[in-house]
Image: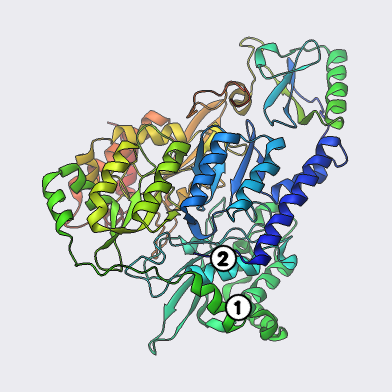
């Protein structure tokens, strides 16, 4: 998969970690965070191109899997798509109440 | 129950070793995700909305207590302390990490379990009656046939790349407890007038975005022809099933477009080219498999347990539980116990590791070490002495597994929905819990009687909404969830796809609407009528009016 950017408004780059499988977002420091609050949000096309290139290389290097851009609402700062909001919040029904994208234990 | 022979063991163990190597190569980058994905799916490993998900096969829903304890161990060691029973009798873990999966598969293999046929375009895990071997209405145990199909279909090279997935269910009683008419192939073992047994073969049923009730392909197939005949069906499907459009690739579409009579001719023509004896297994092999399912030695017990009668008269909660959750057993003095996984505060089908261990213990103590998963996402202890029911009830109570709601309005079938599933369009678990909450009062549930509410969080219909008395489909538009309603569906031997009502509702509106329909039913029902019976008599327009009329 290649992270093609076709969206509108601010963009964030997301994927799943290859090993643990958890949802991650690309940060300002070009690292992956389990917390959407750390996500780099930008409309700058040069920066978006750098994100794309970094995402592809990270996928190639087997750090992450399924990388893609998401639209972010500029007012709320949250993803536009309903599904992406769930990837940020985790399940609203969480039997162990310990979602928060943390690893087990 | 079936025990692996050397061959089974070798196949499963070699698959574990193979997958360990595949994961290792994936992590080192020797294979790409595109190459790895089909390999992990062949081992039941999906990448879901938040994390990986591992689906463990439970062939025909039968487990022994050691296997259930191992699942509890896996839930604790590698996951988050719980498992989830699916609508195809399997068990899912929602949070495994890729690096742990080879070890999980090894732990499963150690107790004769695996994740074969839980994903991909192959013949999936064969499902069956959860009361198999215990039900009073069965003409034989359907599991030897299901096991034969499992062995035939496992890694069958010709059927590894079918146009789409393929689901088979087997029952051996006139009362269908495995929804066989909503399967690609449904098999009913039945007896003819001469007392011989054979197979009623139903084909082309399915739910998903195009719900279709299966049709009779063969009314009474001789036993020895089962595998060659099914092989002919699979070949016709493999040849003519559509591969150009994923949504038209299931056999139900082929049968519908071809017509059942032409399809049957094609199967017969294909069958004529086969050498049945090359495909059919010997009677010795059938006998060997069947022997694993020989009925356990039931004790010679009186028809009615005095202990049971006494406790029923003394404890009304227990009496309710017996009335609602207990099913007659074929052996005198025994009962089939349904353990509800539908408490008011838990997602339908979820069970914690502590509960799994407890249930495994109850299976050992009270049910000859055996338990079952059901497509309605509950657990069954198949062989419990009536004398033990009260002790078992109290033990279940201590584990919060004593809800008396089997077949009632709060016994809802529900897919994981948007809370967990990558395909979902809306949540289903919170709606299910809210409906159960609205109707939580036990007396009211009993008064309403049999009611099957089924909820799916997308059109793929894992929650069986097409065949619910009240079927609910969750959708989303512009960030708002809404729910469409079907009425009059039926998941039994009189299977029917529900009627579409109309525009969708918010969660709150929907629950109010359900309540109005329930009240309408209670006010208009005739003697002995269930909700579904009144619906059939009074019809869609009346119920629809009540559903939509908020005034």
Which subunit holds the residue at mark 2?
B
At 23% from the left and 48% from the top, the residue drawn is: B390
Question: Dot 2 corresponds to which residue?
Answer: B204
Q: Would you identify the image quadrant in which residue B132 lies?
A: bottom left
In this rendering, is residue B84 above or below B217? above
Q: Position of residue B19 (x, y in %)?
A: 75, 48
Q: Position of residue B420 (x, y in %)?
A: 56, 34
Q: Is residue B202 visible?
A: no
In the image, B403 versus B409, the foreground residue is B403
Query: Quadrant of the image for the C terminus of chain B?
Result: top left
Classed neighbour count for the residue bearing mark 2: other residues with Cα under 10 Å, few (<14), some (14–19), many (≥20):
many
Q: Position of residue B63 (x, y in %)?
A: 49, 55
Question: Dot 1 corresponds to which residue?
Answer: B264
**Residue that extends furthest to the bottom in the rendered view of this protein:** B194
Q: Is residue A99 visible?
A: yes
| Scheme of colours in the image | rainbow
């Amino acid at each position: 998969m290649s992270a093609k950017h076709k969206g509108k408004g601010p963009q964030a780059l997301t994927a799943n970690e290859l090993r643990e499988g958890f949802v991650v977002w690309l940060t300002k420091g070009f690292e992956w965070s389990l917390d959407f609050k750390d996500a780099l949000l930008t409309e700058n096309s040069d920066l978006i191109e750098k994100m794309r290139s970094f995402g592809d290389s990270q996928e190639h290097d087997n750090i992450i899997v399924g990388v893609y851009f998401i639209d972010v609402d500029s007012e709320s700062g949250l993803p536009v798509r309903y599904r992406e909001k769930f990837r940020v919040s985790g399940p609203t029904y969480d039997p162990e109440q310990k979602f928060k994208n943390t690893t087990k234990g | 129950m079936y025990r692996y022979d050397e061959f089974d063991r070798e196949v499963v163990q070699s698959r574990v070793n193979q997958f360990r190597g595949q994961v290792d190569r994936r992590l080192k980058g020797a294979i790409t995700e595109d190459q790895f994905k089909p390999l992990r799916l062949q081992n039941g490993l999906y990448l879901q909305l938040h994390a990986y998900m591992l689906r463990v096969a439970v062939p025909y829903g039968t487990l022994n207590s050691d296997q259930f304890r191992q699942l509890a161990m896996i839930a604790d060691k590698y996951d988050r302390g719980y498992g989830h029973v699916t609508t195809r009798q399997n068990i899912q873990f929602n949070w495994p990490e890729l690096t742990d999966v080879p070890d999980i598969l090894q732990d499963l293999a150690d107790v004769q379990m695996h994740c074969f046929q839980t994903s991909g375009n192959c013949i999936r895990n064969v499902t069956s009656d959860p009361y198999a071997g215990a039900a009073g209405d069965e003409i034989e145990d359907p599991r030897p046939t299901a096991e034969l199909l499992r062995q035939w279909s496992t890694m069958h090279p010709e059927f590894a790349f079918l146009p789409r997935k393929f689901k088979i269910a087997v029952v051996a009683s006139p009362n269908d407890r495995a929804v066989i008419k909503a399967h690609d192939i449904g098999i009913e073992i039945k007896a003819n007038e001469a007392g011989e047994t054979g197979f009623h073969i139903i084909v082309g049923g399915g739910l998903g975005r195009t719900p279709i009730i299966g049709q009779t392909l063969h009314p009474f197939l001789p036993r020895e022809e089962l595998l060659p005949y099914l092989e002919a069906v699979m070949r016709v499907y493999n040849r003519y099933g559509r591969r150009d459009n994923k949504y038209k690739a299931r056999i139900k579409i082929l049968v519908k477009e071809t017509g059942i009579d032409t399809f049957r001719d094609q199967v017969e023509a294909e069958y004529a080219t086969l050498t049945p004896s090359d495909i059919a297994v010997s009677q010795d092999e059938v006998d060997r498999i069947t022997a694993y399912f020989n009925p356990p030695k039931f004790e010679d017990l009186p028809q009615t347990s005095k202990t049971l009668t006494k406790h029923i008269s003394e404890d009304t909660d227990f009496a309710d539980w017996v009335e609602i959750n207990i099913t007659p057993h074929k052996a005198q003095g025994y009962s089939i116990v349904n353990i509800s996984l539908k408490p008011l505060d838990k997602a339908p089908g979820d069970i914690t590791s502590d509960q799994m261990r407890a249930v495994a213990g109850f299976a050992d103590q009270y049910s000859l070490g055996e338990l079952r998963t059901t497509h309605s996402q509950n657990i069954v202890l198949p062989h419990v002495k009536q004398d033990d029911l009260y002790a078992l009830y109290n033990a279940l109570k201590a584990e919060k597994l004593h809800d008396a709601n089997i077949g009632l309005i709060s016994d809802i079938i529900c897919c994981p929905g948007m809370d967990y599933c990558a395909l979902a369009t809306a949540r289903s678990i919170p709606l299910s819990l809210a409906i159960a909450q609205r109707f939580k009062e036990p007396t009211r549930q009993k008064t309403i009687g049999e009611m099957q509410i089924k909820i799916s969080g997308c059109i793929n219909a894992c929650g069986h909404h097409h065949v619910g008395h009240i079927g609910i489909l969750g959708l989303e538009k512009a960030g708002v969830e809404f729910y469409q309603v079907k009425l009059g569906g039926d998941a039994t031997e009189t299977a029917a796809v529900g009627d579409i009502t109309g525009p969708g509702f918010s969660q709150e509106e929907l629950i109010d609407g359900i309540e109005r329909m329930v009240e309408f039913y209670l006010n208009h029902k005739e003697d002995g009528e269930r909700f579904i019976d009144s619906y059939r008599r009074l019809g869609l327009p009346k119920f629809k009016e009540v559903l939509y009329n908020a005034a």
